[in-house]
Image (tube, rainbow, N blue to C red):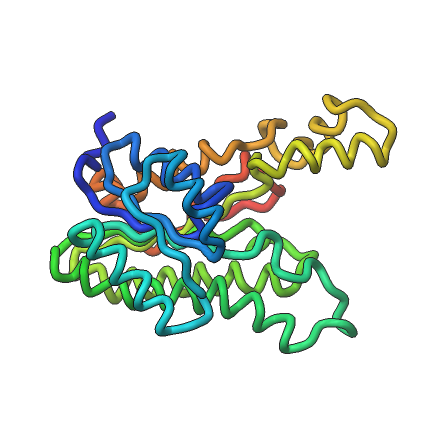
Amino acid sequence: MDLQLQGKRALVTGGSRGIGKAIARVLIEEGCEVAISARDPERLAAAADEVGARAWFAYDAADDDSVEAMVSGAAEALGGLDILVNNAASPGSVHGPMKLADLTADHALADLQVKVLGYLRCSRAAAPYMQENGWGRIVNVSGLAARGSGNTVGSIRNVSVAAMTKNLADELGPDGINVTVVHPGLTRTEATPDRIAQIAESNGISLEEAEARMAAGNSVRTIIDSDDIANIVAFLASPKSIAITGDTIAAGGGVGRGIYY
């Protein structure tokens, strides 16, 4: 299928590694001009060189001025902006699961500033470029903690991204802009081999057994790859996705036993 992405201009935040880097690579393969952004300049430069990004920008997702400068810089480098993929976040939340007695407002705000408010800042800065075009796509990468307990702040931040997505979709839809959210589950990235090795060593089992344990939590019994997430995002970023906006795509290989309709 031709996704009709040739020549589209895309900004991918959190694009220096993992799912973000995979998204940037797939969009480039589909013909997009891509800029990536994240916190670490050295890692960004390496990722941009690896995937063939047109430009990269280091920024602070918690700072309005930094976000504005990053988005305007990307738009200038690309000659405009058609697609925003919001992906910048700390994996699994900054502090990991915490008991209520230990959870403070500062812990929660550290997550919300980067992921929820960071996504909102980027969307606010990027939307005018898309409104000027009369077309655009915003894809928010969130997570399946939105559908399960076990990490209070992780669930809050991912549910919040979904709520923001629907509100932005309703507001921006008349301007030709679709807004969607993708919930990855456990996803294979550069960090996965080390995690598998840790599980194998701590349990005295083989690497193959350790990977099978990790994969046992979904229906397809395999660890979903970052490229699999990137392929979903590429479709949602394309003109072919006109029928989907304000909605959530779960991309964990069938995690959990809940029925969503």
Considering every residue shown, the one lying at the far bottom of the view is 105
In the rendered image of this protein, does residue 211 appear above or below residue 59? Answer: above
Residue 232 occupies quadrant: top left
The number of numbered discs placed on residues in the rendered structure image is: 0
Considering every residue shown, the one lying at the far right of the view is 204
Residue nearer the viewer, 53 or 131:
53
Q: Please give left or right for residue 54 compared with residue 130 in the image.
A: right
Residue 224 occupies quadrant: top right
Residue 214: image location, x then y, percent: 69, 34
Considering every residue shown, the one lying at the far left of the view is 133
Residue at position x 16%, y 61% in the image: 131
Residue nearer the viewer, 250 or 237:
237
Q: Please give left or right for residue 135 compared with residue 142 in the image.
A: left
Residue at position x 19%, y 65% in the image: 128
Residue 202 occupies quadrant: top right
In the rendered image of this protein, does residue 135 appear above or below residue 185? Answer: below
The answer to whether residue 181 shows anywhere in this view is: yes
Residue nearer the viewer, 46 or 175:
46
Residue 165: image location, x then y, percent: 37, 60
Q: Quadrant of the N terminus?
A: top left
The answer to whether residue 250 shows anywhere in this view is: no
In the rendered image of this protein, does residue 242 appear above or below residue 177? Answer: above
Residue 122: image location, x then y, percent: 34, 63
Residue 40: image location, x then y, percent: 49, 54
Q: Please give left or right for residue 17 compared with residue 128 in the image.
A: right
Residue at position x 22%, y 56% in the image: 75
Q: Please give left or right for residue 141 compared with residue 130 in the image.
A: right
Residue nearer the viewer, 166 or 188:
188
Residue at position x 69%, y 35% in the image: 194
